Amino acid sequence: MAQETLFKILSRQPWWVSLLVAIGLFWIAYAVFPPVAPFIPVPFVLLAVYFAVKQWGKGTPSDVGKHLETLRGMAWEEFSALVVEAYRKRGYAVLPSERRGYDFRLTKDGQVILLQCRRWKVNQVGAAPVRELAEAVALSEAFRGICLAAGDFSQPARKLAVDEPVSLVAGADLIELVGEPGKRPWWSPG
């Protein structure tokens, strides 16, 4: 199981939580040893700024919900073209699937990643598609697999992904990957 770090915990919180931690640490340090108090919270202030910028780019939860509904309403051809374009802009060579268990084969810097997005419209993806992707990764000797969903992943699917070379991408992370539907992504040239 992956170790839970303070950075991981704070990354899942609103940006201002890191700022509150910084303020709390300042006052604790000030009470114990005032000369170092201004330096103790600096890393947490920087984290708060980083998280604020990252969270600002994702939009509000209601915006994410609207964008996910737009993605769910797309035809497979339109959605898959959007996903393929997103990975190509990130430098991956993208080929269609040769076998069961995945939809696209991504290659970059000699590493192969299998991408599965077949059940992207469902509200919750179970463990079976994640297991199928993990088996495809093992059979093709790929580096890892990525499973995309416009919904969420069940707890058994998340638990399985922890033990397998599979990453789960859903919700705000999916919107960050493909950009706002109908709008040019921020990383797109021109």
Image (cartoon, rainbow, N blue to C red):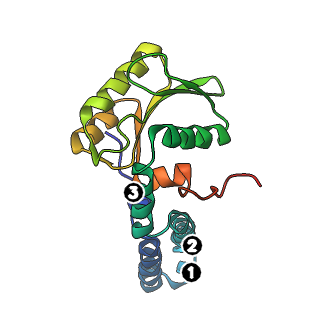
Considering the numbered disc 3 on the image, is that residue within a helix, a strand or a loop? Answer: helix
Residue 46 at x, y percent in the picture:
57, 69
For image coordinates 46% across by 52% down, the residue present is: 173
Q: Where's residue 143, x and y in %?
A: 50, 25
- Give the Cα distance between marks 2 and 3: 39 Å
Using the rendered view, name the quadrant where residue 43 is placed: bottom right
Front-most of 3 and 48?
A: 48
Q: Which residue does the numbered mark 2 point to in the structure image? A: 42
Q: CA distance from mark 1 to mark 3?
A: 46 Å
Question: Of the residues shown, which amino acid type is indicated by label 2?
Answer: Val
* Residue 38 in the figure: left or right of residue 146: right
Q: Position of residue 83 (x, y in %)?
A: 54, 41
User: Label 2: few (<14), some or many (≥20) within 10 Å?
Assistant: some
**Residue drawn at x 51%, y 63% as measured from the top left:** 58
Vertical arrangement, residue 62 with respect to residue 147, above or below = below
Where's the C terminus, which quadrant? Answer: bottom right
Q: Quadrant of residue 172?
A: bottom left
Q: CA distance from mark 2 to mark 1?
A: 7 Å
Q: Nearer the viewer, mark 2 or mark 1?
A: 2
Q: Secondary structure at mark 1?
A: loop
Q: Can you identify the residue that label 3 sits on?
A: 69
Q: Residue at x 46, y 81 (%)?
A: 23
In the rendered view, would you say 85 is above or below 116? Answer: below
Q: Residue 101: which disc?
A: none
Looking at the picture, does residue 189 appear above or below residue 12?
A: above
Under circle 2, the secondary element is helix
Query: Tag 1: residue type?
Result: Pro
The circle on residue 38 is: 1
As shown in the figure, which amino acid type bears the numbered disc 3? Glu
Farthest residue to the left: give it: 156
Q: How many marks?
A: 3
Pointer 2 with pointer 1, Cβ within 8 A:
yes
